[in-house]
Structure formats: structure tokens, C-alpha cells
Image: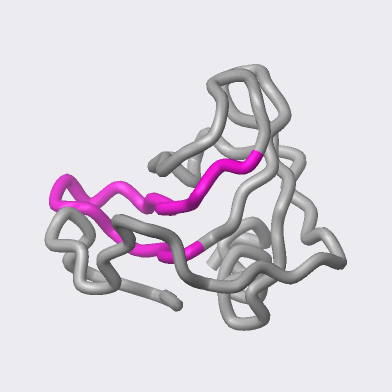
Amino acid sequence: MTDITTLIISAISTKKLITLRYSGSLRTVEPFLIGYDTKKNLVLSAWQTSGQTGTGWREFLVAKISELAIIDAHFAGNRPGYNRADPRIPQKLARI
């Protein structure tokens, strides 16, 4: 497991926000689920609270994430539209 994957799993288990760089922009997200999608890509499903593309649900390819850090701030762990049994990510490593 990569350091980034380990940090994401830790943030999910403690419901802490993370910052990350993705597609050239810095984003802050609430991480809800990490696992392998149907194409075997490791993905993070998260609610983006700030960043270039605004707020809302996003899926991030973990291989494209850099500069990840856990913020010392918690989130509630509930957002409209969250599906902890998301069929697009059949192999789950961690989830809220």
C-alpha cells in the first residue's frame, strides 16, 4: 500500500478532511470511500469542499493524487447521495 493510500484510509477512519493536489489544483475533500473500480483503478470517492471545480461528489484516481495531507478538522460523515455500497467500486478498502 502506498503512503497516500494509507493516509486516505486513516482519514476515512477518523472522519478528517484532507487536502490534495489533483489535475494541477489544490482541493480540500471529505474522504468517504477508497477502493478499486470495475477497471481495477484505485479510486477515492469524496465530497469536495473547495477547489478549482467547486463543491460536490468527485472520484479521484489515487495514482494522480499528490501533496496529500490530513487536516486536523473533522466532518460529519453524511452527505446526500453517498452510497457506501457503490457498485462502481466493487472492491472497497475503507469506507464510512
Q: Front-most of 19 and 40? A: 19
Q: Position of residue 6 (x, y in %)?
A: 62, 69
Q: Is residue 21 above or below residue 95?
A: above
Whole-percent x, y for residue 74 in the image: 74, 70
Is 28 situated left or right of 61 in this image? Answer: right
State how many labels appear. Answer: 0
Quarter of the figure with residue 33: bottom left
Segment tinted magenta in the rendering: 32-49
For residue 34: magenta?
yes
What predominant SS class does the magenta segment belong to? strand
> Where residue 13 appears, x then y in whole percent?
59, 82
Residue drawn at (23%, 70%) of the image: 91
Q: Residue at x 22, y 59 (%)?
A: 89
Asked if residue 54 lies left or right of residue 74, the reply is left
Residue 38 magenta = yes
The picture quadrant where one finds residue 95 is: bottom left
